[in-house]
Image (spheres, rainbow, N blue to C red):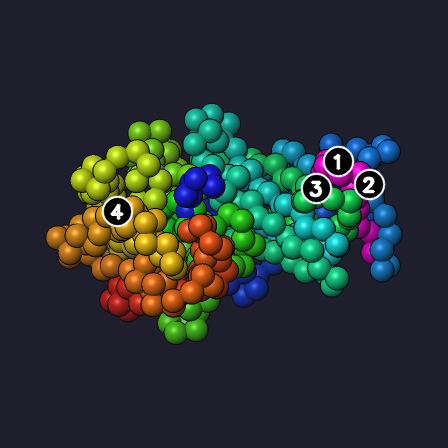
Amino acid sequence: MKQEFCATIVLTLAASLSAASLPAGEEQVKNGEFKDGEAGWSDLANDDNRETKVVQADGKSALLLKRKSAEAKSSATQYNVKLKPQTLYRFSVTGKGDMPITIALRPQASKDKEFEQVLKAWALYTCPLPASKEAATQSLVFDSGLKPDSAYISLALGGKDPGSFSITKVSLEEIGASKPDPKEVVVLLIGDSISITSYLPFSERIDALLAQRVQKELPAQKVRFVNVAADGEYCKELIETKRYEKVIKENLQKVDIAIIRYGANDQKRYGADEFKKCMSTLCDNLMRDYPGIKIVLGTGTHLHNSDEINKKYGVMWQAARDLAAERKYPLADVYKRFEAEGSLKPVNGAGDMHPSAYGVQLAAEVVFEALKPLLEKK
């Protein structure tokens, strides 16, 4: 759902590695530490309702985003950031304040305008940087893929009440190539909001948690996670809107393992039989376009003390189980893990099936159990 029941760091590509372990490289952001004042930044507005300007704070230059009256917008944008094909970049923002901000990286492809239209970067490469009394950083390792050749970066004060946030650094560092490497396993996550959880910081999403588990338990493995899941998406939409074609097939040259978790938004549009049929088509497409690929199917979430909701969505989760059994695919049964928890802690609250940060941790455990044997064979 897009807060329908949406559940997916790349399409293009949010690639999750251990950001801290990757070397620093060429910087693409101009004046990312604001030492040259507002140079390179656009859309700054100052009036009776807001302040958006460079100030000195704690001995450093910082971009201040301040709201003086309720709902006033305070933001800054850097346009025309250049990207190279099949290149890994580390996108990061550092700052602190009494209000959260929203940070966003928006890739663009000059030779294929349809790509930007179906990418859904607002889910993949956008996240909140929470309010904090101490400087905090959110980072995303982004794979430019084959299509994007530029991007723009936006910073916007979150919430609606008066408050402020000071940003001390914005960075997009080139850190390496993402061309096919026989020693690297590329794991693609496909699905809806339960897989992308765009409302959570990059560090709390499932691709980041899976990367941490691999680093801890399979340190010799070179694995990259690309999360292309998007809020509100359903299986048929991925295929019929050309999002599969543009964001996956034409943009990612190598995929070794795919983890697929749809069903919630599908339930609003068609029955379990049609869902299973569409999932079969998606799996067939992946096997055709990426020979030798391994596929993991997953279920959605369970909502404690909500029998009617669980029954309504349960037929879709059962369809995913049945397809996995028929095709002998590994199954990540997130529903059963949430059900075993016996509380609302894994979700955002009563009536909301979206996983909480804790729920994403549980989902990552289940997905990793299904994924680990495949990685060990690789």
Q: Earlier in the sequence, mark 4 or mark 3?
A: 3
Q: Which mark is residue 72?
A: 1
Label 3 is placed on what type of residue? Lys
Label 2 is placed on what type of residue? Lys
How many other residues sit within 10 Å of disc 3, few (<14), some (14-19) or many (≥20)? few
341 relative to 322 in the view: left or right: right
How many other residues sit within 10 Å of disc 2, few (<14), some (14-19) or many (≥20)? some
Q: Earlier in the sequence, mark 4 or mark 1?
A: 1
Residue 63 is inside the magenta segment: yes
Label 1 is placed on what type of residue? Ala
Give the residue at mark 4: 316
Give the residue at mark 2: 68
Q: Which residues are magenta?
A: 60-75
Instruction: Tell me the quarter of the picture where residue 134 sits.
Output: bottom right
Alpha carbons under labels 2 and 1: distance apart: 7 Å
Residue 122 is inside the magenta segment: no
The image shows residue 156 at horizontal and vertical percentages of 68, 41
147 relative to 302 in the view: left or right: right
Task: Kindly identify the residue that appears in the image at 73 percent across and 32 percent down.
Answer: 43
Q: What secondary structure is found at the residue carrying circle 1? A: loop
Task: Kindly identify the residue that appears in the image at 80 percent across and 38 percent down.
Answer: 69
Instruction: Tell me the quarter of the picture where residue 38 sits.
Output: top right
Label 4 is placed on what type of residue? Met
Note whether 45 is above or below 286 in the view shown.
above
Would you say the residues marked 2 and 1 are in contact, meaning their CB atoms lie under 8 Å apart?
Answer: yes
Q: What secondary structure is found at the residue carrying circle 4? A: helix
Instruction: Please state which of residues 351 and 225 is positioned toward the viewer in this rendering.
Output: 351
Q: Which mark is residue 160?
A: 3
Note whether 238 is above or below 301 in the view shown.
above
Task: Kindly identify the residue that appears in the image at 23 percent across and 60 percent down.
Answer: 330
Would you say the residues marked 4 and 3 are in contact, meaning their CB atoms lie under 8 Å apart?
Answer: no
